[in-house]
Amino acid sequence: MTRLLIECTYVFHHPEMNSGIQRVVRNIINNLPSVQDQAVCIPVVFKDGKILEVKQLAPDHSDDLRGRWQSKLETIAQKLVRIRNRYWLIHSRLLPLWPWKSSHNVRRVTYVLCRLASLAFMLPLYLTEWTLGKIEVQSRAFEMECSSDDILVLLDSSWHADFFPVAEKLQQQGVTIISVIYDLIPLTHPQFCDGPLVQVFDRWFEWIANTADGFIAISSTIRDEVRSEVQRRLGSERTTGRWFDFFHLGSELDQIDPEKSVRPAVEKLFTSGRSIYLMVSTIEPRKNHAYLLDAFEQLWQSGSDVVLCFIGRIGWKNERLIERVTRHPELKQRLFMFNDLSDIELEYCYSHAKSLVFPSFVEGFGLPLVEAMQRGLPVMASDIPVFHEIGGEFISYFDLHSPVSLASQVQQFEESGIFPASRDMADWSWLNWENSARQLVERVAGHGQARTQQQTKTSMQSRCDETDHCAE
């Protein structure tokens, strides 16, 4: 049976991350045991130029060495940081005094001494953390051997990792390389990304376009974009030798800890009986939070008491927006922001809100949409192709060029109680993460079998041609 090597390097090393791609990778990996009837699925990571089989995706802090020493290490770290900070406090107080005030050389020597003192305290901590981390990784992953008929599926955000040489070596040994593509936003909309990411992503995609045997996106919208971009870079003839497909993502929140509770501030807001409209995403320009503020300010000015609630960690290029939110006169009145909610709190918010409002400029999928709708929460979203693919007639779409478009829909919903979408949420259904993992595995394995059959057919035809030639 075909072996699929499912790469999860970034999530393996950063198990605490719980947004976007990390949520997808973790859920797919955790559901692989349920889809082994389709293919042998093995989670793998790249480490020090090697490929390792993953036995445990996240560390068990209750049992392993890292867990036993974690609290002690944190206590030591706090003490060392306090001592280090005292040196810098002394440094800052000396600068206005003589001779530091009048002598550049004295200031420079003092700075160097403080740096050395800081390093002397922090270096042992860094070394201890590195050592424990290395031991902990070794307990969760083991070096493995690959065979020529394996299929390596690059599921994680692999543009962060320098794995090109090991992947190329595996391909030379006959391993097929498949790339999962979440979106092409750094290429198509670089204005929404940090400059370094744009450069890294472009370099990665150039390599993946030339190297991968197939591409599987998280929506048909992105699949078509990937095919066009690969064709632009490689030309039609070389692109024909590669396959392009897609799968859809699941909808459960998998990190709900029953021992945790919803914080009082969240519970108080969502049991107040008010109409609460959620925006769930990282706070960054592409998500277009400013549009929501514009639309809801119009509603508030007209006397509406609807509530707008932002949920998501603070990302990048958002200084203006954060300042606008923190200084807004409606903050903690009709405008709320939570940046660190747990999954159980997010589940609570989905279950008690009036609607999800999602004004993104561009997306690869839109995971909060299916998370919300699967819980019966209706969605108002920007009128972009991928949202039509995901939500169809169950979503109410608004014009990104006009905040009035959204404000009018909210007002209509508030006054009539009828959600302004073509189809009722009662008829909605979606994949769970097991089905998503099965879809991914089935489609990748299917293309792998087709490729093997084609290679066999080509080889047989070649032998026949040689036989005929020799007979002549």
Image (spheres, grey):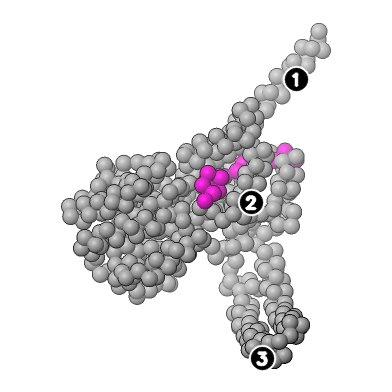
- Give the residue number, with chain letter if any, for mark 1: 463
The quadrant holding residue 240 is: top right
How far separated are the C-alphas under marks 1 and 3? 88 Å
Closest to the observer, 101 or 350: 101
Residue at image location 43% in from the left, 54% down from the top: 287
Instruction: Tell me residue 430's x, y (percent).
Output: 38, 46
Please tell me whether mark 1 or mark 3 is closer to you in this view: 3
Please tell me whether mark 1 or mark 2 is closer to you in this view: 2
Residue at image location 67% in from the left, 68% down from the top: 133
Figure quadrant of the N terminus: top right
- Give the residue number, with chain letter if any, for mark 2: 200
Amino acid on which disc 1 is placed: Arg
* Crowd rating for badge 1 (residues with CA inside 10 Å; few <14, some 14–19, many 20+): few
How far separated are the C-alphas under marks 3 and 2? 46 Å
Task: Mark 3 or mark 2: name the one nearer the start of the chain.
Answer: 3
Kindly check if marks 1 and 2 are in contact, taking CB atoms under 8 A apart as contact: no
